[in-house]
Image: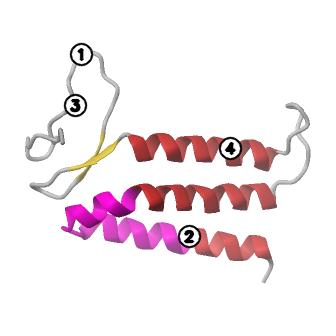
Amino acid sequence: MSLTETVFLVTTALGVGAYLWFRWSDNVALKKRLWTPFILAFGGCLALYFTLHHTTPSSIAGLSLGELLGSGIMLVAIIISQTTRFCRQCATMEVRKRNWFKDGDACRFCGHDLRE
C-alpha cells in the first residue's frame, strides 16, 4: 500500500469516526476540548493527501494543484475551528454565521445562550 493510499484511508476513517462521535456524544466539555485539534488534524491529513496525490505543476506561480488545494483546505479548517460553538444544554454543535442582521449567540435548536 502506498503512502497516498494510507493517508487517504486514515483521513476517511478519522472523518467517519469523528462524525459519528461528534453527532451522538453528549459530552460537551470533551467536544469543546477536542474540536480544534481534530479539525486541524483532519485538515492536515486531507491537505497531505492532496499534496502527495496531485504533483503536476499548475499555472499559478509554479505550485502544484495539491499544494494549492492543501493550503486552501488548511485555511478552511482554521476558519471552521474558530467559528464553531457547542450548546451546553442540548449538546449540539453550532457554526456561527457572519450575519449582519441577526446575532448568532443562541442555539438554533433549544434557544440556550452560546456566549461563554
Residue matched to label 2: 12
Identify which residue is drawn at 52% across, 75% down: 13
**Mark 3 vs mark 4, CA separation in Å:** 29 Å
Helix, strand or loop for the magenta stretch, by majority: helix
**Residue 18 lies in the magenta-colored region:** yes
* Mark sitting earlier along the chain (1/4): 4
Write down the residue under mark 4.
Answer: 71
Q: Position of residue 25 (x, y in %)?
A: 24, 70
> Under tag 2, what secondary structure?
helix
Q: Residue 79 location in percent, x, y?
A: 47, 39
Measure the C-alpha gap from mark 2 to mark 3.
31 Å
Badge 1 density bin: few <14, some 14–19, many ≥20, Cα 10 Å: few
Q: Is residue 72 left or right of residue 82?
A: right
Q: Which residue is mark 3?
A: 104
Q: Is residue 31 magenta?
A: yes
Question: In this view of the protein, which residue sits in the foreground, 22 or 85?
Answer: 85
Image quadrant where residue 24 sits: bottom left
At horizontal 13% and vertical 46% (from top left) the residue drawn is 109
